[in-house]
Image: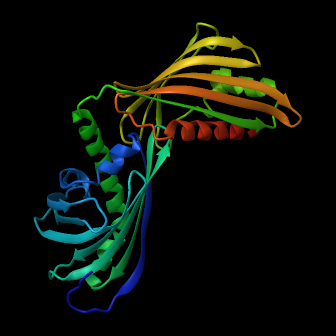
């Protein structure tokens, strides 16, 4: 990319930040895809983005003007280096300094991964410093990115709320197994008692419990409500259809994000003894509703929960 002024550069390690967002990968990825979306969130608190030009394709522009609280405006002009749909973005940008020249070049990599209840977004940014005026910006980058991703969560809530509902159903199924070095009675208790299940059946980091009820018996119900770090409420409601103590659980459950029902599923848990402990087999058949894109996050989330069961049994 072109630069102005002194061509000498200084390489500096940048920032890495990860955020779990209670939105599907397609929505989080799309938030980077247009000027309309980027202007909603791509700046720290107190700043604004009055102008932007974004074309999400390799070589396409990623340019924006950031307005500071004192009214000064600074441009960053760059391009997409890599675009892997719903998985990864790489953006190279020249950041304007106070004199109007290029103060630094920033290389930003964003990766999008399935996570329990939504998407894990990781942003990594490194720098080539071309003017000393860039150093305070680099020092403030961790705080700036934290605030920017908070704004992204808010923008996603607004975008998703305004999105027209598309009535459709996507089906998916998976089977997972784990073997625990614990008795079948202990594994059964981890699945069926409030005290033991509350050690592992929780949301991602930043998740806060709102309500938990549990009655494991044929015809019994379970309800878990929590609030994600981004502020969205997640709700799990299950009806137990078949309960054979120490052997099998079959239940139907529904999931909500706020008041939007995102899925309805049938799950089976089967326990059997092994020479080293207890094998737990989980089979799930899911119907993902009205545009909610699971993209494998339910299976990944269930695998994470099964690993948490193992850790809870070690305690």
Quarter of the image for residue 259 reads top left
Residue 244: x and y in percent read 73, 13
x 12%, y 65%: residue? 70
Residue 175 percent coordinates (x, y): 64, 33
User: Furthest-right residue in view?
Assistant: 275
Please state which of residues 248 and 12 is positioned toward the viewer in this rendering. Answer: 248
| Image position of 112 (left or right of 273) | left
Q: Residue at x 32, y 92 (%)?
A: 8
**Where's residue 83, x and y in %?**
36, 60
Q: Is residue 275 left or right of residue 9?
A: right
Give the vertical position of 4 relative to 111 (above or below): below
Indicate left or right for 268 with 159 as reference: right
Give residue 163's quadrant in the image. top left
In percent of the image, x 40 and y 39: which residue is there?
22
Residue 178 sits in quarter: top right
Question: How many numbered marks does the figure carry?
Answer: 0
Q: Residue at x 21, y 60 (%)?
A: 54
* Residue 4 locus on image (x, y percent): 20, 87
Can you say whether 127 is above or below 109 in the image? below
């Amino acid at each position: 990319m072109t630069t102005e002024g002194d061509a000498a550069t200084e390489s500096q390690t940048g920032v890495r930040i990860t955020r779990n967002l209670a939105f599907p990968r397609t929505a989080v990825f799309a938030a980077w895809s247009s000027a309309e979306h980027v202007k909603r969130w791509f700046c720290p608190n107190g700043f604004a983005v009055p102008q932007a030009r974004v074309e999400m394709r390799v070589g396409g522009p990623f340019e924006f003007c950031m307005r500071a609280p004192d009214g000064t405006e600074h441009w960053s002009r760059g391009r997409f280096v890599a675009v892997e749909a719903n998985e990864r973005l790489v953006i190279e940008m020249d950041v304007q300094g106070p004199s109007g020249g290029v103060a630094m070049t920033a290389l930003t990599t964003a990766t999008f991964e399935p996570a329990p209840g939504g998407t894990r977004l990781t942003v990594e940014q490194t720098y080539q410093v071309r003017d000393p005026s860039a150093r305070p910006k680099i020092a403030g980058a961790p705080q700036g990115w934290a605030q920017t991703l908070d704004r992204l969560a808010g923008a996603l809530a607004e975008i998703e709320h305004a999105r027209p509902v598309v009535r459709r159903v996507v089906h998916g199924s998976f089977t997972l197994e784990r073997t625990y070095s614990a008795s079948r009675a202990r594994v059964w208790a981890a699945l069926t008692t409030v005290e033991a299940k509350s050690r592992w059946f929780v949301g991602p980091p930043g998740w806060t419990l709102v309500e938990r009820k549990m009655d494991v018996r044929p015809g019994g119900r379970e309800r878990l409500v929590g609030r994600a770090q981004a502020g969205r409420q997640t709700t799990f409601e299950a009806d137990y259809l078949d309960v054979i103590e120490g052997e099998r659980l079959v239940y139907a459950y529904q999931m909500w994000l706020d008041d939007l029902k995102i899925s309805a599923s049938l799950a089976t848990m089967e326990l059997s003894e092994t020479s080293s402990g207890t094998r737990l087999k989980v089979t799930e058949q899911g119907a993902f509703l009205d545009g909610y894109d699971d993209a494998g996050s339910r299976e990944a989330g269930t695998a994470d929960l099964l690993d948490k069961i193992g850790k809870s049994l070690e305690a």
